[in-house]
Structure formats: structure tokens, C-alpha cells
Image: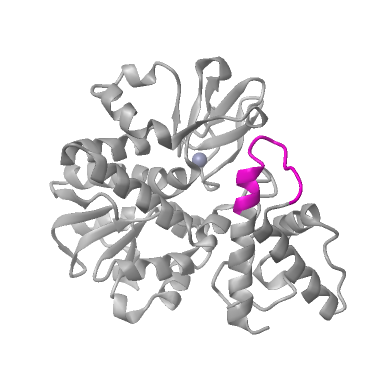
Amino acid sequence: MNEDEGTHLLQALAQAVIELHNVGRSGVISLPYPAHVQRIMDRIVRLCLDLGQRPPSGVPELINWCTQRGPGDWPFPVQPDLVRPDSVLVDPFSRTPSRTCFELAGTAADAARDLIRQLIEAADAPNSGRRARAFLVAHPVVVNGLTHQISGGIATWQRVRHLYQFVPPAHLKERQIAACPVCGLPSKMDRLKVVWCEAGLCDRVEEPLRYPATNGIQLLDERLRLFVTLPGRIELRLVEHLRAIGTDITLTDAVEGAYLLERPVLGKRVVHVADRIEPALLAVDAARWPDSLVVVPQQLFDRVPHYRQRFTNAASADADVALVSDDELVALVGGTETELDRA
Ligand SMILES: [Zn+2]
């Protein structure tokens, strides 16, 4: 098996992990496993046997391997630097598909864009589609009554309610769900401390937001949580900071999340905000946004080793994109020296 075939197999495994997660939402997986999952399992068993290695005893052990094995630890070669060397497909703490898994599977970002496109196309006015998108950014979790508190909330809720699901009992702890106070996404807590959140990189100094199960909690579709809510929070902050220093920036394409800057920065006016844990996979996706600034939260530069370098190595020269953090963009607009100037 060559690197390309191995990379496809790792992507197929990521898709299988997500499929299994979806069928197991209720906490019970009934046999047989989905055909795609069983096919991947059979291929990995055969590869192990060919190499004289012990194969996984079943799908549960394969999933266990996914909590431990980085891209270089599988019985097949994977394109180097496609994902970070310590990335795993299943988060060992939450036992749910990791952000790397969703990004590698390659289907979630497209699905999120399609869901937003459907919202925009179904809207009776351009603003109502954008309001619906803004609602998803602001509310990864909703509770009964919340929609009555926001202006225009009920009409917007009618447009987006099909994108929310009730939380399965298995996801509740002490009859409540916790959300990270930084990213707003579901988190797990121990006593009053956040010990894990879906975004994975947030500071854990504040108490989680807690919603009691009795309030009819619903969670936004996880593809939208990761690919719309997460970058959407950075978009809001960026817009606020840029306007505060007198530069306007406007949303021009709600499906792609494209913004237009009042004047060019690094020769570009189109801005795409992304929040992806895997820089090389972001570089591949960024090929759809030619001649633009790709903006990621500064936190990724601070906490993910070699983020900029990995992105640059994987980016296509034809795409002509420039990667900057949100802090760097504000500094560039404001005329402050950044790491980019010093480099
Ligand atoms: Zn968080």
C-alpha cells in the first residue's frame, strides 16, 4: 500500500469513526456494525496480518487504537505532515471523534456549508438568512424560553430548529450539560471546573455554563458547532476590534464566511476566518478561497506547534492565500509591527 492509498484509508477510518459515533448517539450500538465500518475494520485486520502484527480484536479495540495512534502508528503509510504527528481520531477523554477526525474526514466542512446555503436559499430576505447564521454562531446550545428573549428570535428559531437535537441522556452529567465559557461548545466538568471542551484549546479558568436537563436543552448539529460556531465567534471579535480602530469589514458571502475589508492588507481585501486544529488540512481547504487572507485565532499559533509553517508547506502557490492570526490582522490594520513584519 502506498502513501496515497494509506491516506485514503485513514480518511475512510475517520469517516467510519464519525458514522459509528452517529449511530451510537443513544449510547447503544446494535450489531451488525454499519457496512462501511466493517469494511474498514476488515482491511486493517488484513494489513496487520500481512505485516505479522496482532490485529484489533474487534471494532471496540479499533476505536481504542484511534484514541492512541498518531498518523505514523498505523499498519499503513500516510502522507507525511497531512495531520500533526500526535493527532488521534478519537478524543481519549470524551471518547468522541476529535476535531482532527472531523477535519480529516473531509465531509463535515462541506456539510456545514451546504446547511448554511439551504438556510440562505430558504430565507424570505437576505437579512433573515444572515440572522439565522448569526443565531447558530451565538447559540450552540439552546434551552426552552431562550428564543423568546431575543428580538426576532421566534421567526429565526423556526428557520433553524431542525438543526438542533435533544441531548441524549448519556451526554448529561447529574442531569445537566456544561458548556465551555470561552468557546460556548459542550464541555465536561469535574466539580465546577471545565476539564475538557470540544474546541480543546480554551483556557480553563472560569466555571462552565450549566444548563439543567429539565429546560429542554438542544444542541446544534456538531458539524455546524465546529465549522460555523467556532470560527463565527472569532469573526464577531475580529469585526468588533477592526471597527473599534476605524476600519470597516462586511460579510459578503454567508455560505463561505467571506468578509470584505475596507482597504487591502498584505494586498488582499477578502477575509476568511477559520478555526481548524490541522493546519495542512486547512491549507488544502483554503484552495477554494483564492487571493484571500485566511485568518485563524491567535491561540492556534500559540498552542499548536509549527502551525504557520505546516500551513505554508501544504498551501498551493496557485491559491495565493496569506495566513494571519486575528491579532495580527488587527495589528496590521492598526499599523503595529507583527511577527510577519519581523520575519
Ligand atoms: Zn472551549
**Quarter of the picture holding the C terminus:** bottom left
Q: Position of 199 compared to 92: left or right?
A: left
Q: Residue placed at 13% from the left, 46% from the top? A: 246
**Rendered view: 263 above or below 10:** above
Q: Write the start and end of the magenta stretch as one range.
A: 18-32
Asked if residue 69 shows in the view, the reply is: no
Q: Main secondary structure of the magenta part?
A: loop
User: Magenta span has 19?
Assistant: yes
Which corner quadrant of the image does residue 289 belong to? bottom left
| Residue 197: percent from left, percent from top | 56, 40
Q: Residue placed at 61% from the left, 30% from the top? A: 168
Q: Position of 10 compared to 228: left or right?
A: right
Q: Residue furthest bottom?
A: 2
| Residue 16: percent from left, percent from top | 63, 57
Q: Residue placed at 37% from the left, 78% from the top? A: 316
| Residue 59: percent from left, percent from top | 77, 55
Q: Residue placed at 45% from the left, 33% from the top? A: 164
How many labels, in total? 0
User: Magenta span has 214?
Assistant: no
Front-lying residue, 163 or 276: 163
Asked if residue 128 shows in the view, the reply is: yes
Display coloring:
one colour
Which corner quadrant of the image does residue 38 belong to? bottom right
**Quarter of the picture holding the N terminus:** bottom right
| Residue 45: percent from left, percent from top | 80, 69
Front-lying residue, 183 or 29: 29
